[in-house]
Image (cartoon, grey):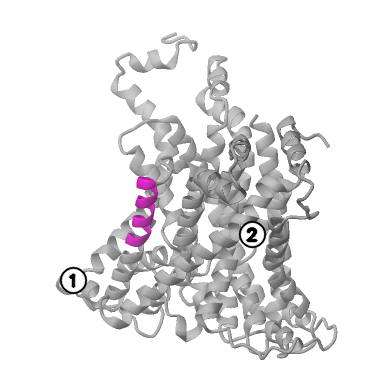
Amino acid sequence: MTAPPTAAKSAAARSAAPSRFRLPFTWQGVFSLGMYGFMYVPILVLAVYSFNASRYGARWEGFSLRWYQSLFNDRRIFAALQDSLTIALVAVGISSVLGTLMAIGLAKYRFRGKTLYRGVSYLPLIIPDIAIGVATLVFLATAGIALNLWTVIAAHMVFCLAYIAVVVSSRLKGLDPHLEEAALDLGANPQQALIKVLLPQLLPAIVSGGLLSFVLSMDDLLISSFTAGGGVNPLPIEIFSRVRTGVKPDVNALSVVLIMASGLIAAFSEYFRAYSDRTSR
Amino acid sequence: MTAPPTVPREIALAAKPSLGQRLGQLIEPLTLLLPSGVWLVLFLVIPTLLIAEISLVPGLRPGDVPGAYGLGNYLQIFQPVYLRVLFRSLNFALGTTGLCLIVGFPVAYWIALMAPKRWRTLLLVVFILPLWTSSLLRAYAWITILRSSGLLNVVLQAVGIPGQNILNSPAAVYVGMTYSFLPYMVLILYSSLEKLDIRLLEAAADLGANPAQRFWQVTVPQTLPGIAAGGLLVFITSLGDFVVPTLLGGASSMTIARLIYNQFLGPTRNWGFGSSMSMLLILAVSLAIALLIRYGDRNPENYS
């Protein structure tokens, strides 16, 4: 045990009172373990049921892959997945560039209205999706813009921009501002200083901000519902329309596939965050 | 050579620039800030101002020509049926915030102060990992557990307790929302508890404070900014939540978010009324944030 001296002292003080019986675990530890269970049981339940042969019952009626089979033969799901991926990839791709530029601009310049600009850029993190969704619908209807894939992408870009800018901004705060100045002093022009000095340092933040907004875009139901129109059918809308009428076993199978995919993305993101923390010190 | 490259930029800026130089200096800030700025104005600021405007046009339906301005939409909110919806939404949000706080505090406390030091980051990451999965599917998972032929009742009946009908009741909404937003609360409380000065707790113990006194008079005041921030985040998110009340609450759990949805995509379709509800929601959220900034931690950057 490498306990610090203060802790050792209080531990000694505690053990000096022999009448007090000490359990090998604390109620906080037991309670926390229970809460880990609370967080993971529903996910495990989905996973187990996805292999259950029964359609309706909660009882186990034997192992079966039929729901996975019906999932992989489901054209609608694949079309919806394609829509969702297109929306997320395009929105995140454009937002990564614009959001990073915005974060750099906000860190670099002082100008009148900067507080307002920054405040507006935080709004998508604060205003409920439903309010943003209806506002965008009203705007598109007023401007006479027909709803299609691009209106969904445009609406998703708003929150993607905000999340990427927040992550990149916090990374910018931890950077050494003298590095860019040193590059300029050594004769680099501002574009070179940006591309060769600043961007490599910001890359981990851009990647983790991009992954975060990718996941949010893939998960978005409300903003898509208000901006998609009839022709576009992203995955959350498809899932929502299926499950609001009850339990669908092929959705269980889909859940397992999607949860594993998001687990992979989360692992990537945590890796990049750790990398980012390590290099910013 | 007009200006040697080693001239500090402050001096170069201080020298009186010609018009061309000033335009040249504007190019960089404009490329950095203009594209996002235009996008946010076009797809966030103007739309929000637009619903503020049509919330003042009573009874506007899609395709209508806007009529005269009036406060009719806002007065409609005061009808008992809609007041009940507002009250219910507020109850769900406050109840969820309270539940997340009560349940989340011990977990965050255990991870931040009691768990083995080298496991803490991993334990936190594992707890908040479900946030990365689809919120829709996490709510759906509770349908399979809470429905009348679901897992909960199978387990209850196995131990001899009669089955409960929890799905489509407010209780299901509380469970689902607490499940959905607990990781946020634990994340924020953890970062607050992590900074807690253990020496203060030891000093209090040396001075004779019992565990309860130490908790209420040292730990809680020290982590109050985190409690406020976590509470605000959960409150705002659950107030505007649509998925959990719709999937788990059924017809008995109409909330403000569902009401707004119905005014635009559901059977009722009253854009003016929907916009006024939407403005009310934005107002409630802004009010909560203003209260936090006024009475809580003065540094809003901590929560971004």
Q: Classify residue B47 as left or right of residue A271.
A: left
Report the residue at 54% width, 69% height from top: B177
Task: Characterize the local packing of mark 1: few (<14), some (14-19) or many (20 or more) Cα atoms within 10 angstroms.
Answer: few
Residue A226 - label: none
Tag 2 and tag 1 share a subunit: yes
**Magenta region includes residue A163:** no
Which quadrant of the figure contains the N terminus of chain A? top right
Name, please, the residue furthest toward the front. Answer: A19
Classed neighbour count for the residue bearing mark 2: other residues with Cα under 10 Å, few (<14), some (14–19), many (≥20): some
The kind of residue on which mark 2 rests is Trp
Report which quarter residue B57 is drawn in. bottom left
**Residue to which mark 2 is pinned:** B132
Secondary element under disc 1, as helix, strand or loop, is loop
Q: Which residues are magenta?
A: B283-295
Residue farthest left in this picture = B68
The residue drawn where x is 68% and y is 44% is A272
- Helix, strand or loop: magenta stretch: helix
Coordinates of residue B210 in the picture (x, y in percent): 60, 47
- Label 1 sits on what residue type? Leu
Q: Nearer the viewer, residue B299 or B74?
A: B299
Q: Is residue B11 above or below residue A127?
A: above
Residue B71's tag is 1
The structure residue drawn at horizontal position 81% and vertical position 54%, both measured from the top left corner, is: A24
